[in-house]
Amino acid sequence: MNHEEVSRLLGAYLDGELDLTTCMAVEEHVAGCERCQREMEAEHELIGIVRDETPRFEASPFLKTRIRAALRAESPPVHSFWRRFGWIAGGVAAAALLILTVYFEWNPGIPGLVRDAVADHVRSLQVSHLMDVASTDQHTVKPWFAGKLDYSPTVVDLAPSGYPLVGGRLDVLDNRNVAALIYQRRKHYINLFIWPSGGEALPGRAYVMNGYHVLGWTKSGMNYLAVSELNEQEFTDFTKMIQDKTD
Amino acid sequence: MIEQHHDGRGDLNQPEFEQVFLPHLDAAYNLARWLLRNDQDAEDAVQDAYLRAYKAFSRFRGGDGKAWLMTILRNVCYTMIKKSRSHETPEHFDEEIHQAAGQTDVREAFRQKANAETLQGALEKLPDEFREIIVLHDLEGLAYKQIAAAIGIPIGTVMSRLARARGRLRAEIVASNVKESSP
C-alpha cells in the first residue's frame, strides 16, 4: 500500500471502520513511515478534540411534550391501544384530575384567581399548549392578539436581559379570555397574563403556591399576573423589568 | 419478520413508535440545531420529522430506527435550508486551501487553541454536508454504515467525505487562531 492510499485511510482506521486485512496493511506502512505517524497522531488528536469539546445541543424538555401531543393529534380516534386500555387510562386521568383539583382547592388564603393562574401555567407546560404563536419578536406576537381579544396587550421583549419572549397564547382567567405571554429563562418558563382591570385592580402581592411564584399588579388600567417556577430572585427581577417597561 | 413493530392491522401505534424513536430525540435535535443554526427552526424541524416518521411508520421494517429518523430529519432540514437560502449565493469553498492547511506545519497553530468556542465557530463555517457528517459521526457516534443509510451514499463516500470534512475543520480552526493572533 503506498503513502497516498494509507493517508486516505487514516481517519477510517482510527474510527475502527476498516476490515482486518486493510487494517494490517495500514499498520505495516505506518510502522515504517514517519510522515504517516505524524499524520496519524494529528488526526487522532483532532478527532478526540472534536468528540470531547464540541458543544452538543440538547432538546428542551418541552419539545418531547410537543411532539407527543402532535403524534396524539395524528392518531386515529379509536386506537387499538385505547380499545384495550382506554378505560384504565380514562380512570387514571379522572383520578388525577380529582387529586389535582383537591390539591389546588385546599390552599387556604390563596385567592381563586392566583390558583387559576397557577393551574393555567401548569397546564400550559403539560399539555403542550405553551404557545399559540411561537415568536421571539414582539412585533409578531402583539398583532397576533388583535382580532382575538378586545384589547391590545403591551408586549415587551426582555431578551437583552436574559428573559427572551418565546411566544403568546390565548388563555382563560377570571372567566374571560386573556393574553398570555411566555418568557423563557434557561429551561424555565414564565407565563405573564394580561387583561384590562375594568376597575378591579390587583393588589401588588406575591404568592408562593406549590413551588410556583405568583405576582399580580395593575398598571395603566391593565392587570398583570406573572407565574413561574423560577427562583424568587430571578422572578422578582423579571416582574420589576416588566413593570418598568410597560406603560 | 414482516412488520414486527406492529399489531398486524397496519394502523398507527403511538406507544411503540415513541418507544423506538423518542430515545433519539436529543440526537435528532443536535443534528437539526447544527444544520439550521437556531433553536426554533431546529425544534420545528424535529417535530415535523417525527410526524413524518410516524405517518410512515407502517413502512418501517424494524432495524435501525436512528438512521431511519435521521434520513427523514435531514430531508426536512435541507428543505428548510433551501427555502431560506434560495436568494443567497451558495457558499463556495476552495478544496486546495484546506488541503494545504491540513499538512503538518499547522499542527502547532492548531494546538494553541482548540476549545469549545473555536470548535463551534469552525464547525459552523463548514458547508452543510461536512458539518452534518461530523455531527453524525463524531458527536452522535453513528457508524459509517448508519451514516451511509441515513444520507443515502456508499460507505466509501462516507469515508472520503468525513476525511475531507475533518481536514476542512482543522483548517478552519487554524485559520481562526491565525486571525486571532495577528494584530
Image (cartoon, rainbow, N blue to C red):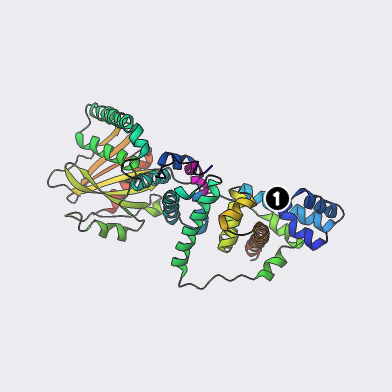
Q: Give B107 or A127, whichever is nearer the viewer.
A: A127
Query: Is-magenta flag for residue A49?
Result: no
Q: With B32 as the anchor, is A97 left or right in this view?
A: left
- Answer left or right for B120 relative to A210: right
Q: Position of residue B17 (x, y in %)?
A: 45, 43
Q: Position of residue A176 (x, y in %)?
A: 17, 45
- Image spot of residue A85 (x, y percent): 35, 32
Q: Residue furthest left?
A: A199
- Give yes or no for residue B26 being in the magenta stretch: yes
Quadrant occupied by the C terminus of chain B: bottom right
Determine crowd level at label 1: few under 14, some 14-19, many 20+ residues with C-alpha closer than 10 A.
some
Q: What stretch is highlighted in magenta?
A: B20-27
x, y percent for residue A175: 16, 42
Q: Main secondary structure of the magenta part?
A: helix
Residue at image coords 64%, 52%:
B144
Instruction: Residue at 30% x, 39% y: name it.
Output: A123
Residue identifier under label 1 = A17
Q: Is residue B117 visible?
A: no
Q: Which chain carries label 1?
A: A
**Quadrant location of the N terminus of chain B in the rendered image:** top right
The secondary element bearing badge 1 is classed as loop
* A31 left or right of A43 in image: right
Residue A99 in sight from this viewpoint: yes
> Which residue is located at x 46 percent, y 58 percent?
B76
The residue lying furthest to the right in this view is: A32
What amino acid does circle 1 point to? Answer: Glu
Is B109 above or below relative to B14? below
